[in-house]
Image (spheres, rainbow, N blue to C red):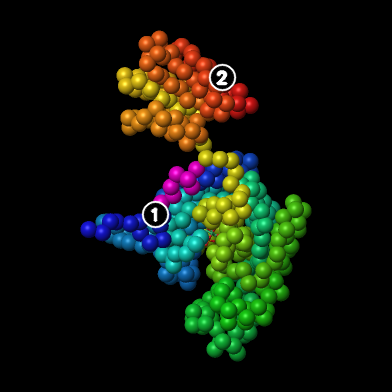
Amino acid sequence: MESIKAPRGTRDILGDESWKWARVLEVSRGVAADFGYREVMLPIFEHTELFSRGIGDTTDVVEKEMYTFTDKGGRSITLRPELTASMMRSYLEHDMNRAAQPAKLWSWGPMFRYERPQKGRYRQFSQIDFETLGSPSPLADVETIDASMELFRRLGLSNLQVLINSVGCPECRPVYRETLKKFFSDRINDLCETCQGRFERNPLRILDCKKPGCRDLTGLAPSVTDSLCGECGAHFDAVTSGLSRIGVSVSVDNRLVRGLDYYTKTAYEILAGELGSQNAVCGGGRYDNLAEAIGGPHVPGVGFASGIDRIIITMEGQGACVGDEPKTDIFVIAAAPDAEIDAAALAHELRASGLSADMDFMGRSLKARMKQASQCGALYACIIGPDEKSSGSVAIKDMRSGEQETLPMSSAAARLSLAIGERAR
Ligand code: AMP
């Protein structure tokens, strides 16, 4: 029988990578605390309608990429492809709009999209998501971008490029839509098949197309900035000047769109060269009409989602891994057949006193156990041989210097805590 493998587009995050994930999350938690975002934990599946209304029927995500199924109660359920719609649903469901505004919320976890897998693009991937709900202020936009850049700074990432645009609002976007349609109407045959379909339904999304023929054309298309209404123009200026004031340099990219009515004003993306074609580590923007699209009142909002898988690929590519994989402090070795249980009891005591300790219980030789101690990076080996066993003591070997001393078993934990504490200082 053929062995069962993980489904295409999913992967196991093994020990030599998973500690980096823990580190990214620890740093994210620190940034969230420093910027005043509170963590919310959201369900991994939601009613399909939340995404079809919240992300929009004409997006690739909703049209082609969702993992949707009917549950045993006959409901249409979708594994979440993103977090913003869920966050807004949660905000509305828990009446957070009645408390002081804005609500600054963050979350993280796995997302699911049926995409063609490649480096940096998976069918199950994880995002860190920060959202500021309830404020129309451009300072909220600036703060979310600042938070994402601070996260990347603390993770040691460099050479990131921030692209920013405004997609206008329901006042000015129809005007731009018409301008664009007029521009593409004479050139429709030069567009790819998908974009020909977008021409009627959602011409703004043509700007997003990565196919060379379409890109040649979109490079010549009229810019959205020229069609913005007074309010959207002023908002965009306030966001870009706010970012310049805090030293975040951005490039304006008029082809960056979120071509749906719920997305308003600011759209941004942060790119890292190390990622190849899937080069976005972060995507964000404002969505002042999302709450209404999912049946709520008017709630302005802005936020970003950053892919953890891609953050780690970038960290590795830039040699920016912060810290090291946590090591075991002490390796306990029974060097006499009847000392195994003493070794287990000592390991237990060491762990209870706040140290990390490991031991072998596969019956390996003394030599193999010493090798194991150095392989796991232990600072000290605690050896219980026949002499130590009979005198109730333990030999403590400093793995770096090779020095060894023998202590009563009862004082080993206190002595090692002290020694390891001193090393850490
Ligand atoms: P989006 O929700 O599409 O705006 O994506 C936000 C961020 O999530 C992107 O900038 C990526 O870092 C990450 N991301 C999106 N799709 C995937 C995927 N299929 N695999 C890995 N990361 C992804």
The quadrant in which the C terminus is found is: top right
Q: Which residue is mark 1?
A: 45
- Magenta range: 12-19
Residue 30 seen in this snapshot: yes
Q: What residue type is disc 1 on?
A: Phe
Q: Position of residue 272 (x, y in %)?
A: 61, 59
Q: Is residue 341 above or below residue 370?
A: above
Q: What residue type is disc 2 on?
A: Leu
Residue situated in front as seen by the camera: 300 or 242: 242
Image point (55%, 46%), residue name: 24
Q: Position of residue 397 (x, y in %)?
A: 50, 23
User: From the viewer's perspective, is 299 left or right of 348?
Assistant: right
Classify mark 2: residues with Cα within 10 Å, few (<14), some (14-19) or many (20+). few
Looking at this view, name the residue that lies furthest to the top: 391
Query: Which type of secondary structure does the marked residue at label 2 adopt?
Result: helix
Residue situated in front as seen by the camera: 370 or 240: 370
The image's mark for residue 418 is 2
Pair 1/2: label in front = 2
Image point (40%, 57%), residue name: 10
